[in-house]
Image (cartoon, helix red, strand yellow):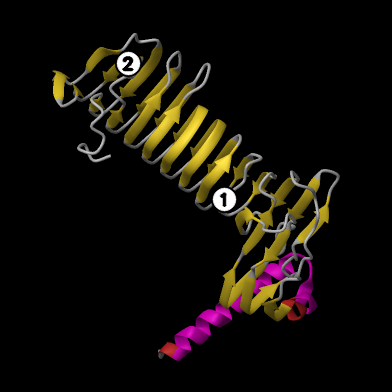
């Protein structure tokens, strides 16, 4: 059978599947014939909205990657960057983005795709760009990945799929995703990051409270500062190594741990910590000197007065603790 014949057979098979599905939904032959159409999605333009200097901006578009930045005129600008081309068999058209002014800000949403569709020889890119006043509070309820930059009023991102990049943020920041997450130059009371299947990267983060969890992936944190009246931090991976370098303030409570992987921690010489280090299968060393070579080991390391407490643990891996302030020689 020639290549052309093979392609024709596959296309015919897909058409049959579409027809059977539409028929099963109750439309019959007429519905199938009427559902076949060629789609070139054209996003409707959105006029800028005035919503004040500190609006609540709510975004809900599960299919799109969402990018949020700072506008240069104090208005809320929304651009639907979605593109769709190709032969699409569908029971309805792709929904337009809806943008509405609310009592305290702006709501941006797209209806979920509830129709049945099969796309042949198609191209699609689903994305939106939102520019807002820097003092906005941004709430992304659903998205397929996000990039958020320059917001000072707080950010909450819930991504069902895709990576999340957070940069130059102030205020309380929360983010979760099925992919990897990065946080760069974040300042505020609290930062919470969680991934179900991806690594976490933090750089130049200074907060009073930190939660960084991943169910499968490594955690890397550099130039991390946890400080405040009662600072606290939890960095945990169910399955991955941790490399953490930073300052942990006095009178705080901290945990740096993994269920499967090595732990590398670097702290300044003047740290004020009592560190309880334990491994179920590995060794513990401090500044390159091994404290124990048993398959399982536990040691307490006191730095300064030890007013802050830290749990440093792995179930399967070695622990490397550096306290001499030589940040670069150990590969951080």
The answer to whether residue 163 is left or right of residue 58 is left
- Tally of numbered tags: 2
Taking the spot 14% from the left edge, 22% from the top edge, the residue there is 289
Q: Measuring 60% from the left and 34% from the top, which residue is drawn there?
A: 172
Asked whether 29 falls inside the magenta stretch, the response is: yes
Q: Which residues are magenta?
A: 4-31
Quarter of the figure with residue 304:
top left
Note whether 270 is above or below 47 in the view shown. above
- CA distance for labels 1 and 2: 35 Å
Q: Nearer the viewer, residue 188 or 290?
A: 188
Any part of residue 17 in sight: no
Q: Left of 311 or right of it: where is 209?
A: right
Against 43, is 7 above or below?
A: below
Residue 171 vertical placement versus 49 (above, below): above
- Residue under the point 56% across and 75% down: 123
Apparent side of residue 230 relative to residue 78 in the rendered image (left or right)? left
- Circle 2 packing at 10 Å, graded few (<14), some (14-19), many (20+), is many
> Which residue carries the number 1 mark?
149
The single residue placed furthest to the front in the displayed view is 73
Marking on residue 64:
none
The image position of residue 67, as x and y in percent, is 60, 57
Q: Does residue 307 lie above or below 288 as drawn? A: above
* Rendered location of residue 159, percent (x, y): 58, 48
Characterize the local packing of mark 1: few (<14), some (14-19) or many (20 or more) Cα atoms within 10 angstroms. many
- Could you tell me residue 310's position as x and y percent? 38, 17
Answer whether residue 97 is visible to the viewer in this image.
yes
Which quadrant does the C terminus fall into?
top left
Q: Quadrant of the N terminus?
A: bottom left
Residue topped by disc 2: 275
Q: Residue at the spot x=72%, y=70% of the render?
A: 22
């Amino acid at each position: 059978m020639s290549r052309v014949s093979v392609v024709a057979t596959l296309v015919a098979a897909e058409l049959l599947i579409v027809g059977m599905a539409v028929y099963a939904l109750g439309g019959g032959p007429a519905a199938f014939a009427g559902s076949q159409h060629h789609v070139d999605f054209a996003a409707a333009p959105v006029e800028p909205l005035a919503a004040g200097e500190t609006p609540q901006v709510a975004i809900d578009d599960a299919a799109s990657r969402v990018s949020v930045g700072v506008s240069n005129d104090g208005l809320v600008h929304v651009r639907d960057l979605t593109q769709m081309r190709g032969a699409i068999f569908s029971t309805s058209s792709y929904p337009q983005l809806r943008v509405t002014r609310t009592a305290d800000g702006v709501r941006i949403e797209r209806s979920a795709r509830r129709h049945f569709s099969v796309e042949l020889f198609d191209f699609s890119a689903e994305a939106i760009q939102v520019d807002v006043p820097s003092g906005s509070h941004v709430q992304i309820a659903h998205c397929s990945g996000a990039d958020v930059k320059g917001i000072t009023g707080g950010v909450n991102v819930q991504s069902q799929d895709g990576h999340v990049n957070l940069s130059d943020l102030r205020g309380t920041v929360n983010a979760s995703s099925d992919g990897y997450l990065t946080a760069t130059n974040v300042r505020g009371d609290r930062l919470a990051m969680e991934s179900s299947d991806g690594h976490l990267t933090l750089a130049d983060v200074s907060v009073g409270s930190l939660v960084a969890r991943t169910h499968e992936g490594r955690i890397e944190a550099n130039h991390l500062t946890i400080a405040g009246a009662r600072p606290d931090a939890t960095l945990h991976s169910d399955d991955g190594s941790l490399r953490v370098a930073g300052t942990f303030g006095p009178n705080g409570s901290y945990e740096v741990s993994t269920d499967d992987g090595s732990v590398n921690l670097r702290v300044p010489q003047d740290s004020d910590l009592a560190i309880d280090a334990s491994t179920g299968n590995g060794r513990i060393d401090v500044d390159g000197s091994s404290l124990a070579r048993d398959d399982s080991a536990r040691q307490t390391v006191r730095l300064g007065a030890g007013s802050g407490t830290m749990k440093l643990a792995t179930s399967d891996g070695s622990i490397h603790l550096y306290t001499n302030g030589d940040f670069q020689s150990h590969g951080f």
